[in-house]
């Protein structure tokens, strides 16, 4: 008769051991395994019987084993779940585990929720649709206020209760606009239709805008980076301490998911915007869209590419004449610049790439722009434009009359097309404003 058969004959079915006060045995610093086939289904066994069934490892000097307390159950016992209620009485064991606590099913301080709601009533705002709430009081202030009422509640408990009642830490969201044109939605739908039409035909569609001006020097840049020690930067951000300024004007190609940035060093003018688009077309667009004669430009209503700037329109007209292009320009309504694709598809990844890094020189700025990548395949090129563009220039009435602008029937102040003129006008005759 084998050893397993003899154990079954003596004790019944094989059993396994559930440790209650300790989880393993140890002789001479080594863990001992329990031969469970030597122990039968004896119910609550005496510790001496368990020690005799287990025994020390072979070849080691036997030392005094600590007192053991095991609950013996057969292998075919149904699966057990984690015990959540009070455990058995301590009469069967010499000592019960400290983590075994009886659950009463009630709050220790049942009135704390009512008191917390009263404290938050006057300082709570929220979203009536989603139910998200926020408050001006911090967990520390709420904890002190509850302590004054006789409740012993810490900051961690306050945070947990706030989360359970729909509160969350929120930042400000830029969604409101003082000036919201009544034709805003109509213009947005028109832009979406024209963009789909150009993309479906395979024609180039670019989104243009100017990124926030950056001071060149050892200045603090918002964001955090993984470092052992923080970088030391200047305590002030005075422009007089800067080595220069960088004005990134960008061109984002929606068809190819590519960016193109020119770092202006003087002023944000229509001349800078047109020069950047011209350089992009010469170095990228002309080869990528060979044979196409239509170009769609999506721009904001203000800034260097303002819809009211005749200098901007004159520069686009010069591009149409030089490259024989039919250029359609569509402006986003005031207060809707965040829907311009370049804002979140190009400028946002660039800001994330150089977050927390001082922009000490132009080479550093170019490095961060050129290494900006996304999982969607975004790549970007950049260069420095050292030209000193002047401001305050105006066009004469004769020069404005030479611009061949064809306004659209729908919202003509924001949508227009410029076609090549029969008589070419050189760039020297164009004055920007």
Image (cartoon, helix red, strand yellow):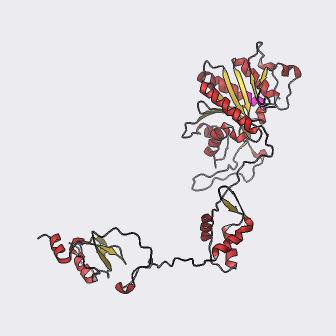
Where residue 203 appears, as percent x and y from the top left, is 63, 24
**Quadrant housing the C terminus:** top right
Is residue 375 positioned above or below 43 on the image? above
User: Does residue 248 appear in the picture of this structure?
Assistant: no
Judge by depth and name the residue closer to the eye, 299 or 347: 299
Judge by depth and name the residue closer to the eye, 205 or 397: 205
Is residue 279 positioned above or below 368 on the image? above
Please report the residue visible at 68 percent of the width from the left and 74 percent of the height from the top: 115
Q: Which residues are magenta?
A: 269-274
The quarter of the picture where residue 271 lies is top right
Where residue 263 appears, as percent x and y from the top left, is 70, 35
Where residue 261 appears, as percent x and y from the top left, is 66, 34
Please report the residue visible at 70 percent of the width from the left and 20 percent of the height from the top: 326
Task: Locate residue 340 relative to residue 380 in the image: left or right.
Answer: right
Please report the residue visible at 34 percent of the width from the left and 67 percent of the height from the top: 79
Extreme front residue here? 129
Judge by depth and name the residue closer to the eye, 356 or 433: 433
The quarter of the picture where residue 87 lies is bottom left
Extreme left residue here? 1
Task: Reply yes or no: does residue 33 show up in magenta.
Answer: no
Where residue 380 appears, as percent x and y from the top left, is 61, 34
Task: Locate residue 97 relative to residue 147 in the image: left or right.
Answer: left
The quarter of the picture where residue 144 lies is bottom right
Is residue 307 positioned above or below 223 on the image? above
């Amino acid at each position: 008769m084998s050893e397993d058969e003899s154990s079954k004959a003596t004790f019944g079915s094989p059993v396994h051991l559930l440790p209650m006060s300790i989880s393993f045995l140890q002789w001479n610093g080594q863990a001992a395994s329990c031969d469970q086939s030597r122990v039968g289904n004896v119910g609550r066994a005496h510790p001496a019987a368990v020690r005799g069934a287990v025994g020390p490892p072979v070849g080691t000097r036997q030392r005094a084993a600590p007192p053991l307390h095991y609950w013996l159950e057969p292998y075919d016992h149904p699966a057990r779940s984690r015990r959540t209620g009070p455990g058995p009485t301590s009469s069967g064991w010499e000592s019960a585990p400290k983590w075994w606590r009886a659950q009463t099913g009630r709050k220790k301080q049942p009135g704390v929720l009512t008191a917390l709601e009263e404290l938050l009533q006057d300082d709570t705002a929220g979203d009536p649709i989603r139910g998200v709430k926020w408050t001006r009081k911090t967990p520390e202030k709420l904890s002190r206020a509850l302590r004054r009422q006789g409740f012993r509640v810490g900051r961690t408990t306050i945070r947990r209760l706030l989360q359970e009642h729909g509160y969350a830490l929120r930042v400000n969201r830029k969604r409101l606009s003082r000036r919201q044109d009544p034709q805003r939605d109509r213009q947005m739908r028109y832009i979406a239709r024209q963009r789909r039409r150009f993309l479906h035909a395979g024609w180039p569609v670019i989104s243009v805008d100017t990124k926030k001006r950056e001071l060149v020097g050892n200045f603090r840049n918002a964001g955090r980076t993984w470092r052992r020690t923080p970088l030391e930067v200047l305590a002030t951000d005075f422009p007089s301490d800067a080595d220069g300024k960088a004005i990134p004007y960008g061109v984002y190609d929606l068809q190819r998911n590519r960016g193109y940035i020119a770092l202006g060093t003087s002023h944000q003018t229509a001349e800078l915007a047109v020069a950047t688009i011209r350089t992009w077309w010469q170095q990228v667009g002309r080869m990528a869209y060979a044979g196409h004669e239509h170009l769609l430009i999506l721009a904001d209503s203000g800034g260097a590419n303002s819809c009211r700037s005749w200098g901007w329109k004159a520069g686009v007209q010069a591009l149409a004449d030089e490259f024989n292009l039919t250029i359609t320009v569509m402006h986003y309504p005031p207060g809707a610049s965040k829907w311009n694709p370049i804002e979140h598809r190009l400028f946002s990844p660039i800001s994330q790439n150089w977050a927390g890094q001082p922009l000490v020189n132009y080479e550093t700025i170019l490095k961060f722009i050129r290494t900006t990548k996304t999982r969607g395949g975004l790549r970007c090129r950049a260069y420095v434009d050292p030209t000193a563009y002047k401001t305050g220039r105006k066009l004469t009435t004769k020069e404005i009359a030479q611009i061949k602008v064809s306004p659209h029937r729908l919202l003509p102040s924001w949508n227009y097309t410029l076609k090549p003129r029969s008589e070419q006008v050189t760039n020297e005759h164009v004055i920007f404003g």
